[in-house]
Amino acid sequence: MSAPTTTTASSLRRRTDRFGYVFIAPAAICFLAFLAVPIVYALYVSFRREQVVGLGPGAGGRTEVWAGLGNYAAVLADSEFLASALRALVYGLVLVPTMLGLALLFALLLDSRRARLRRLARIAIFLPYAVPAVISSLLWGFLYLPGTSPFHFLAEAVGGGLPDVLSPQLVLLAIANIGIWGGTGFNMVVLYTSLRSVPSELYEAATLDGCSELQTAVRIKVPMILPSLIMTCVFSIIATLQVFAEPMLLRPLTNSISTTWSPLMKIYRDAFTENDIYTASAGSVLVALATFVISFGFLRLVRSQAFAQEER
Amino acid sequence: MTSATPPRPSWRPSRRRLLQSGAGLGAAGLAGGALAGCGSASSSAPVELTFWTWAPGIEEVVALWNQQNPEVQVLVSRQDAGDAAVTKLLTAVRAGNGAPDVVQAEYQSITSLVAFDAIADIAEDLDPGTVEHFAEGIWSSVGIGDGGVYAIPQDTGPLQFYYREDVFEELGLSAPETWEEYAEAARVVHEADPSMYLGTFSSTDPGLFVGLAQQAGASWWQIDGERWKVEIDAEPTRRVAEFWGGLVEEGVISAEPMYTPQWNAALNDGTQIGWVSAAWAPGVLEGNAGSTAGSWRMSTIPQWEPGANSTGNWGGSATSVVVGSDHQAEAVRFAEWMNTSADGVLALVEHSGVFPADLANAETALEAPPEFFSHQSDFYEHSTDNADGVQPFTFGPNVNVTYSLFNDAFGAATRAATAAAFANAVTTVHEGTVADLENQGYDLA
């Protein structure tokens, strides 16, 4: 009796296996077509270059040849690319701590026992995230330009003056401000949701032990949501490396932002202004590699602390 | 995007053509031999041409053609102006599908488009009379010196000087005839009111700077026999750069970019009271500075040599046929009608507000001044005289790179705000342009 049963079970398992492939097919096809293939193609293109044949113009005026690591060498030796990477780094150092600090602060305030109008406040803080970066950059552009800014108008009305935030010294902060404005709400919601899932017995115990609200926040809430904090941090770092829309849209308004202000702007210029998709692909691969290294490096660095609790 | 294919003769049916004929005739068409694709347009159905353009009101111009030519119907597909359109066209051509039949092309991008094999040589399909419609300088800019014709000129933008007549009268100024007088006027204006400027140096508008250099006698690219030659870092361009750098250093003109909300506000509230711009400026002023209607006046651009009549060109565009279009002959006929027929040119002036390149029809089409300058009845006569002074200028195959270099180099120079920094920026642009051509594999003279 036992033998047939086994056969049925194993054939059933085989059939389920086959169904499994059917079920993952849509996702797998999408992944292959829209992620894996383009990545492989970009890698391929990054090792190629185009060369003018003879006089250039017309049909057959160009031919594609192997470039080896030439494009990579060119990108890494390009002072504009390095300068843009440095700017992205400083931008990240400004943006990530400020944005996450604010998000954490708002989440803790909303979670505190004395919070009023929670739902309204949460929506109000989250709302900027729903505004596309293109729109918010244009809006902030109006607010930054001294000629159209109501802030400058008001300051002049009371006899004061405001610094021009689009000046070369401050423009990085102006760009970071747009990112902070747009990103704080999203991160706040992530942290707040994670705070709500902390078991309330913990707070009761803490209160019984005589913890103040502030002590609860610092000693219990923050450590409990550390994994979420780290996750939002990694996402923010990735977003930082990809800063593009804000400086791109502010650029025509000022002399302070070059066409290669951020790494992606440089890649965009290479690909679409200079029609050099080869160097642009090499640049993209390098940015992707940097993203991997920084994200995983950061995770490695903090993993022991963050997930120690869960493992315990 | 396909990678650059091995040399392919331009008459070979492109993938797009094969795809289209395949769709029309089904598998039988392919089985019957690819040659069938060449005659895919049957005689009964009207030919359809797709036209990429960004000219305002162009739909009404095209509607007139469609009405007069039921057998060749043109579909307008509206695009973003300038670089975005070039990028999109190159991408579509490389991809082998999605490219239109007819495109609007700015003069400075024609050489690049030819270099990337995106626009076709239409010399063979051209009516022999078409060339007669245009000034020599403009006609030369739709070829690349190889005898081919790659576009039919549509409009031009001769530079001239726009100023607030009321403010000038108040300050006892008259329209500057030389650049020296312009500088003097800039000082007077700024001294009279520190918030007021006669103009701005915009690091985001390389096209205007090229026009100014062109006026001074520069031609940034040249064809030397069979090779390209770059001549940006030469006397005329340096003279122009140092002149504007000097004014920025003195602080008597503004250094804020044009086409920003702030610049619009300044035109409107009377803190920008002059603009060196092209013949198409009235439309921009009307849109951006509506409240100043009736107080602007146009004069000839200030000259380097007193009494001369030389100017440059800013903007303007032509109509090209895309490589691989199934209906090149029809496309050329449409482009000729739009840009050289009495009906077409009049419609362009009326609906798109362009300053036409066609000399033969311009006079009747341009009888009335633009609405914003209705008080200056000889506006177009004057503009036509100015257009006579447009100096020759050759655009090379990497104008987009040069313009991008200009943005960055002159952005930095404007921040430094010294005449010396402006002169250095010219060198930076020159060196970057040469390096890019060499990197692409061009053999330079």
Image (cartoon, coloured by chain):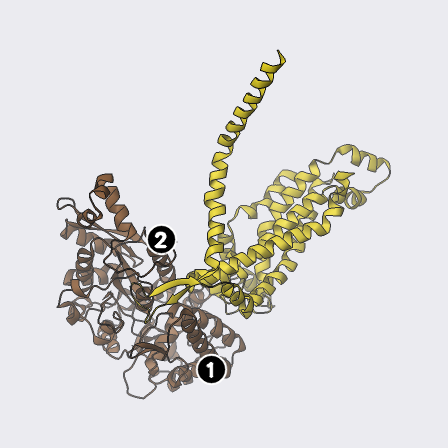
Chain colours: A yellow, B brown
Within the image, what quadrant is residue B443 found in? bottom left
Which quadrant is the C terminus of chain B positioned in?
bottom left
**Furthest residue in direction right, as rendered:** A209
Res A217 label:
none
Task: Give a yes or no on whether discs 2 and 1 share a subunit.
Answer: yes
- Label 2 and label 1: CA atoms lie apart by 41 Å
Report the residue at 22% width, 67% height from top.
B149
Report the residue at 67% width, 53% height from top.
A297
**Furthest residue in direction top, as rendered:** A1
Q: Please state if A303 lies on the left or on the right of B371 as rendered.
A: right
Question: Which tag is nearer the camera, tag 2 or tag 1?
Answer: 2
- Residue B203 percent location from the top left of the image: 45, 72
User: As displayed, is residue A293 above or below residue B298?
Assistant: above
Report the residue at 49% width, 55% height from top.
A43
Within the image, what quadrant is residue A206 found in? top right
Report the residue at 53% width, 66% height from top.
A73
Q: Please state if B343 lies on the left or on the right of B16 as rendered.
A: left
> Is disc 2 placed on a helix, strand or loop?
helix
Residue that mark 2 sits on: B95
Given the image, on which type of amino acid does mark 2 rest?
A: Ala
Work out whether residue A202 or residue B9 is closer to the camera in this orientation and state it. B9
Q: How crowded is mark 2: few (under 14 residues within 10 Å), some or many (20 or more)?
A: some
Q: Can residue A50 be seen in this view?
A: yes
- Residue A278 percent location from the top left of the image: 45, 61
Residue that mark 1 sits on: B423
- Residue at mark 2: chain: B
